[in-house]
Image (spheres, rainbow, N blue to C red):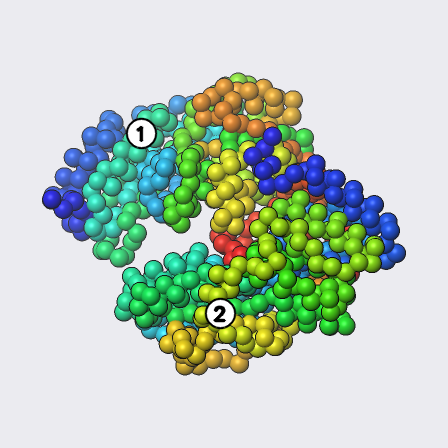
Amino acid sequence: MSAMAPYGDPAAVAAFAARVARSAEKLQRRVTLMEVCGTHTHAIAAAGLRRLLPEWVRLIAGPGCPVCVTPVGYVDRAEALARIPGTIVTTFGDLMRVPSSGGSLERVRAEGADVRVVYSPRDALQIARDNPGSTVVFLAVGFETTTPTVAGALAEAEADRVPNFLILSGHKIMPPPMRALARDPEVLVDAFLLPGHVSVIVGSRAFAFVAEEFAIPAAVIGFTPTDVMRGVEALVECLAEGKAEVINLYSRVVKEEGNAIAQALVDRFFVSADVVWRGLGTIPGSGLALRPRFAQRDASLVEVELPEPLEPAGCRCGEILKGVIDPPECPLFDGICTPITPVGACMVSSEGTCAAWYRHERFAGGSDGPGGGG
Amino acid sequence: MKPPDRILLAHGGGGRLTQELVRELFLPALSNPALKVLSDSAILPELPPGRPALTTDAFVVDPPVFPGGDLGYLSVCGTVNDLAVAGATPVALTWALVLEEGLELDLLRMFVAGAARAAAEAGVSIVAGDTKVVPRGKGDRAYVTAAGLGVVPPGRDLGDHRIAAGDAVLVSGPLGDHGATVMACRHKLEGRGLRSDCAPLAGLVAALLASGADVHAMHDPTRGGLATTCNEVASRSGLRVVLEQGAVPVRPEVLGVCEVLGLDPLYVACEGRVVAFVATGDADRALQVLRDHPLGQGAARVGRVSERGRGEAPVVLRTLYKTERALDLLAGAELPRIC
């Protein structure tokens, strides 16, 4: 057996696929399940799970890729900061190639700015320690899973008095956009596959409103193909029986109340804010800003000259993030917009819906597989 | 304690220090008749019959020392392997260093010893070299460029033009060991058991070709890994490569590093593996020959070549779940993911 096997159980996946097919027969209509975590999008595409589902069960990707929902204005600001002499901008790799109004961080770096890819905010903090004469800005992008690690780095910077470590918060939280999607008449979602790692932090209870207020069933799931198929099976069964509940299928790590220590750490540094999601617009209370007490570490307060944010013309990332269309329906997909020449952010990160489609599903039986397509 | 001896700008100046470096460091390690003349060009004995093959490569690995190899060893292996997979018997190498001022001499000694060891393993001589030194900050410790000369014996014809639908795709061992090891070092990840597969493949390839198995083409899956190699083959041949995920050997520790860094092992570099495209009737025999060689014990048959229909992906992975997905070329260096 291949060493690839530990990351999935083909027999279990096949068994769940068969059960999904049986449950789907009880449905009287086509149903749409939305995953709101980029890692799920990637996992589903990489294992080709769409092609194991009956035609009546459709999986779509919601706004779960942090890079993809980061607005152009954020990248513009990051670029402007990088151009200030004596500034080192540190970032996760995904952001390097995201198109800004005039270029990208990758291009700014080629022009001479000091932009460095890090794997963790603590690496950025170390760079600040090693370069006391420079201002080090960490591009803090990510959902509830990433924020505690940034808060941890901030706590360390405070304790060790590292004054030159700043962050540009682009942090977002997941429940508010899900509420917005549930309310949006354009978006037809029958059930949600909930993000496993986000739920580790916030707890499965944070998503109870989906079932309680909107009568939409949802399942917290892990990230192996077996986890995903098990979640799909449970949700199709719920829909067939007309039940709306939030099921925790990732209880090996997810508790109802979440991780209180991580929550407290985040709360020490961040406060809720109304922020812009690329393609979705401003969503109240969906972001996290640094508390005013830490203003000296807030790179969004550094004065820079910004261009008028220029969203790429013709890009339908917004509708793709809402699951209204699949990537092949965007006129730019696979022509003007490819991973080498990304127009929209969804094409950059491997978690982006468009990049995942481009890499894994582009050739699969025409424009989409059974269960995909609009 | 005495501070370590370091490379000075003068070591690249062509004067006394350069000569000292050559006589005390390079010559004893690499000694061979063509090199020790120290003339402007190495004059080689007449080549054996066949077509000459010439390759060149630059090496900038970070970190320059890693479990299983170092910059010097890697540079000779990489050059030898480019010759070997073309069906050429390596004859001679050139080896040039660009050093950063301040490099510890012990590190340089390690690179030279690594190069000498790889050359000895591959049965090839380093017949010419050069050293330049750049000011501190203008380079990253050490870079190497190497060129390799080999000979393809008369009657041997390997290349993607010979790949045909039905060919079996073989790999000589687990994939991604080199890339995962270097990435783990770079990101200071604990990786128990991780070790680069870096090795000169001339012997393994010679054994495979000597077996008489009908090998159509070979490649070494370096940057971009097996998926990229297969894409290049598919593009040049106009055919389709179908890989079986369940058959692709990957070590658990490599999978672990890939999981942490968000990489796909099919795209991670090897430096001591060969991908062979073999006539289907000879595939079992070729596989056995690979497995009988110390560098091919983990060999596996991982896929096949087929005709490519209109609109079909050039390279496809049949997953463990019996689904298919396209394996595309990477857009750039594989980007780490956020969550």
Image quarter of residue A135: bottom left
**Residue sitting at x 74%, y 43%:** A16
Residue A267 percent location from the top left of the image: 49, 69
Residue B108 percent location from the top left of the image: 24, 41
Residue B184 in sight here: yes
Residue B140 percent location from the top left of the image: 30, 52
Q: Which residue is mark 1?
A: B117
Parent chain of label 2: A
In-front residue for pair A28/B312: A28
Image quarter of residue B66: top left
Parent chain of label 1: B
Residue B311 percent location from the top left of the image: 72, 49
All told, the count of numbered labels is: 2
- Please give left or right for residue A262 compared with residue A374 in the image: left
Do the residues at pointers 1 and 2 share their chain? no
Dot 1 lies on which element? helix
**Residue sitting at x 25%, y 31%:** B30
Name the amino acid type tagged 1: Arg
Determine whether A85 is above or below A328 in the image: below
**Residue sitting at x 17%, y 49%:** B8
Q: Between marks 1 and 2, how big is the CA–CA gap? A: 57 Å
Image quarter of residue B119: top left
In-front residue for pair B86/A122: A122
Name the amino acid type tagged 2: Asp
Dot 2 lies on which element? helix
Which label sits in the foreground, 1 or 2?
Answer: 2
* Mark 1–mark 2 CB contact (< 8 Å): no
Determine whether B158 is above or below A193 in the image: above
- Please give left or right for residue A250 compared with residue B156 in the image: right
Q: Residues within 10 Å of mark 1 (few under 14, many from 20)?
A: some
Determine whether B305 is above or below B290 in the image: below
Kindly identify which numbered label has been placed on residue A267.
2
